[in-house]
Amino acid sequence: MNPSVLEFRNVSFSRGSKLLLDRMSFAIEKKEMVALVGPNGVGKTTWLKLACRLLQPTSGEILLEGKPLRDWGRRELPRTVALVPQELEIPFNFEVEELVAQGRVPYQKLFGSNRPFDSAAVESAMEAVDVLRLRHRVYSELSGGERQRVKIAIGLAQQPQLMLLDEPTQHLDIGRQIELIALLRRLNESGITILAAVHDLNLVAENFPSVILLTPEPAWIVGSAAEVLRPELLERAFCVEKAALAQYCIEPSSDGRMQAW
Amino acid sequence: MISLRAKTGNKESAGPIEGKLHLEPIVAKRRHDRRPAKVNLILLVALFVSILVATAVGPVRLPLWQVVQTLLHPSRAGDAREIIFALRLPRVLSAALVGCALSVTGVLFQGLFRNPLADPFVLGTSGGAALGGAIGIFLIPSLSFGGFGAMAVLAFCGSLLTMVLVWYLARAGGRFAMETLLLAGFAIGTMLNAATVVFELREEAASSGLRVLAAWLHGQLGVPTWGQIALLGPLVIVAVLLALPVAKRSNTLALGEEYAEQLGVNVGHLRIATVILGSLLTAAAVSFGGLIGFVGLLVPHFLRILIGPNHVRLLPAAALGGATFLVLADTFARTAFAPTEIPVGVFTAFLGGPAFLYLLNHRSRESAQ
């Protein structure tokens, strides 16, 4: 049997005296598309950073493709897992293409020059997210949706097996949100395992087969969307009354799951 | 796979959603000149020409052909030979080395702090180097491995310690607050300058050390010995070459420290390399010319407009451009009000101060948006 792409074994994480994650165990299989859901401040960003070794768990073990994270080489790891951060502030007028090229850094030696292989990877990453025509634009002058796609292009240039995205739909209007989710689905179909922190539960219900729900207890629930997106669980997670929740879910999803509230 | 792109005639419109999503002009042009070889060649020629011109200009004006002839046949005796080899050329070369060192340091520090305002003078490391050098001259003059050498080593230590101090003061929560960085640099730089002034008051008038010190505080390039140039020249050139791989990683650092770490860059090592190289170059510059401010801010800023922010292209251009700039600036400073020489540091402050304020204003407007 192939090892899972990402596996948490009894992972706990605390910052100071605050326990953010309590003995979490689960596995994500190859080509899954998973949403990470939970209220603000519950540690979704922390969780994503744990999964790409920017943070170390307090206890427990995280395995990537069956190999413990700490055994991965410094430049080997970013070739398998890419983190697309929530915010990206770029000083100076860097052009989009120059930024996407940074996704090739894990493949390059310090003294080596650019290989054609790298340029091709950058090119196809930009093409996949449709930013080719933005290649000479300055990142800081792009719109929110364009920035989001450029960030994903950097991740794609890493040619990862697993892509972690931190709130990729944040600050986007509804049209750009749908576009972005469609993009994630296409990436997923092309073989990349997707794990995205998403706030909009409607988007999650319609597009993500599996959901990880983090709640402030700390507790966690992993399952299919239908299993996790249940009013009584969400009520506990987001600390609101069912009635109040319904008020914020005015747009019923196609299968009427949210409408039931 | 569905393509997000749909072509309609000449125009490109995008998106699976109906209607035009992108109202901006379609394919943006490359805004920076991507031919670094061409730019560097122009800058190299400019440097040679400015060195020749600067060597010709002075109280005794030498024709250019005579300068070229003397440089090609240095054994031929004559007045021109004395003027060129004893006075002009050492000074012009030291201006070139100082300009090169300061603007390369600027590029390195700006990349490290992700801030176009970071300059060795602004961050106070020049001040630290000056204090270190002053200690070398006055307190331990006996420590003489080459006299000048001891001073340069202590200047390096002063610069390095200041950098480390400013670093820890300005860093909060994994990032640098621009205000804290600039204010910490300002406060420490001022303290170090004040400490250097104390040496000035303690010493007997007319001691040779005192003259060196006064020149340092004003940013006055003197006439160095050929020994000094032979010591610091190769050092500057080697440091600039070592800075090239650092510059490559500075591009990744533009995405942020955490992102660079995620991409497999050892940010800790990068930081140490940048600080050591920057301190080395600052110390070399200060040993020659003292506190010459804003060169590391002016030159990279101007070049960024021309060739863009990519550090790999920017660094060699800054090395050549900085050298050319300071050779011309020093020539202006020593000839414009002849027979009075104004220190080149005063001249660069007049140019760089407004540029600094412009950038500061520009940035605070940007962040206010």
Image: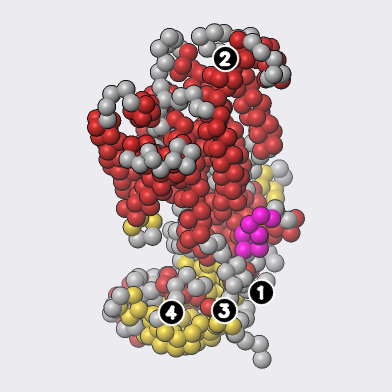
Closer to the camera in the image, A207 or B78: B78
Q: Nearer the viewer, mark 1 or mark 3?
A: 3
Image location of residue B137, percent across then percent down: 37, 36
Magenta-tinted stretch: A104-112
The image shows residue B111, relative to residue A78, as above or below, that is: above
Crowding near the residue tagged with mark 2, few <14, some 14–19, many ≥20 C-alpha atoms within 10 Å = some
Q: Do labels 3 and 2 share a chain?
A: no
Residue A105 is one of the magenta-drawn residues: yes
Secondary structure beneath dot 3 equals helix
Report the residue marked by disc 2: B83
Q: What amino acid is labelled 3 in the image?
A: Asp
Relative to A153, B9 lies left or right: right
- Tell me how far mark 2 sits from mark 4, CA to CA: 69 Å
Secondary structure beneath dot 2 equals helix
- Tell me how far mark 3 sits from mark 2, CA to CA: 65 Å
Q: Which mark is residue A71?
A: 3
Residue at 53 percent across and 40 percent down: it is B104
Q: Do labels 3 and 4 share a chain?
A: yes
Secondary structure beneath dot 1 equals loop
Secondary structure beneath dot 4 equals loop
Crowding near the residue tagged with mark 3, few <14, some 14–19, many ≥20 C-alpha atoms within 10 Å = few
Residue at 48 percent across and 61 percent down: it is B268
- Tell me how far mark 1 sits from mark 4, CA to CA: 28 Å
Q: Which mark is residue A191?
A: 1
Q: What amino acid is labelled 2 in the image?
A: Ile
Residue at 45 percent across and 18 percent down: it is B333
Q: Which mark is residue A57?
A: 4
- Tell me how far mark 2 sits from mark 1, CA to CA: 73 Å
Crowding near the residue tagged with mark 4, few <14, some 14–19, many ≥20 C-alpha atoms within 10 Å = many
